[in-house]
Amino acid sequence: MYDCQTDAATEFSFAPETPVRPASSPVPRSTLRGRFYCLPRPGHQTADLAALQTLACARGYRLERHTQGWYLADVTFEDALMLNARLGERFVTHCELRLARPVRMA
């Protein structure tokens, strides 16, 4: 992930299994959802777009055209991580995620 305020990039991961939760319990789904953008890298192939389309359809998303690339709407946090892991070599990706309901401060 890139932090523009400090001009630094850091790696992050999401582990669905933690020592606190037994492996047999259902994995909670994140309430974060948003748009997942894919911008083609220079020299991209048509097979790259086909791979993106296949992954999107398999997860129930529709691929939409953007001015410089493509995006998927209403993507979950978990799916965004999976898509980035599978397509990050072929596309420049970024995602804008938000909670369905705003958080209220007391």
Image: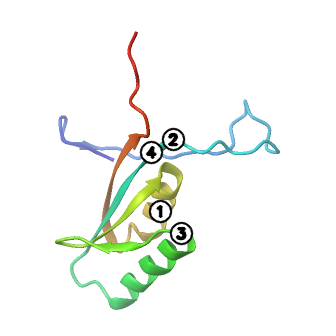
Instruction: Give x and y (percent) for residue 26.
Output: 75, 45
Residue placed farthest to the right in the image?
24
- The residue carrying mark 4 is 12
**Above or below for 86 versus 47:** above
**Disc 1/disc 4 C-alpha distance (Å):** 11 Å
Please report contact status of discs 2 and 4: CB closer than 8 Å, yes or no: no
Q: Nearer the viewer, mark 1 or mark 3?
A: 3
**Disc 1/disc 3 C-alpha distance (Å):** 18 Å
Observer-nearest of 35 and 27: 35
Task: Answer few, some or many: residues within 10 Å of disc 1's Cα (few below 14, many 20 plus, some between 14 and 19).
Answer: few
- The residue carrying mark 1 is 85
Q: Nearer the viewer, mark 2 or mark 4?
A: 2
Q: Earlier in the sequence, mark 2 or mark 3?
A: 2
- Tell me the kind of residue under disc 2: Thr
Instruction: Give x and y (percent) for residue 63.
Output: 38, 74
Q: Earlier in the sequence, mark 1 or mark 4?
A: 4
Q: Which disc is residue 60 wearing?
A: 3
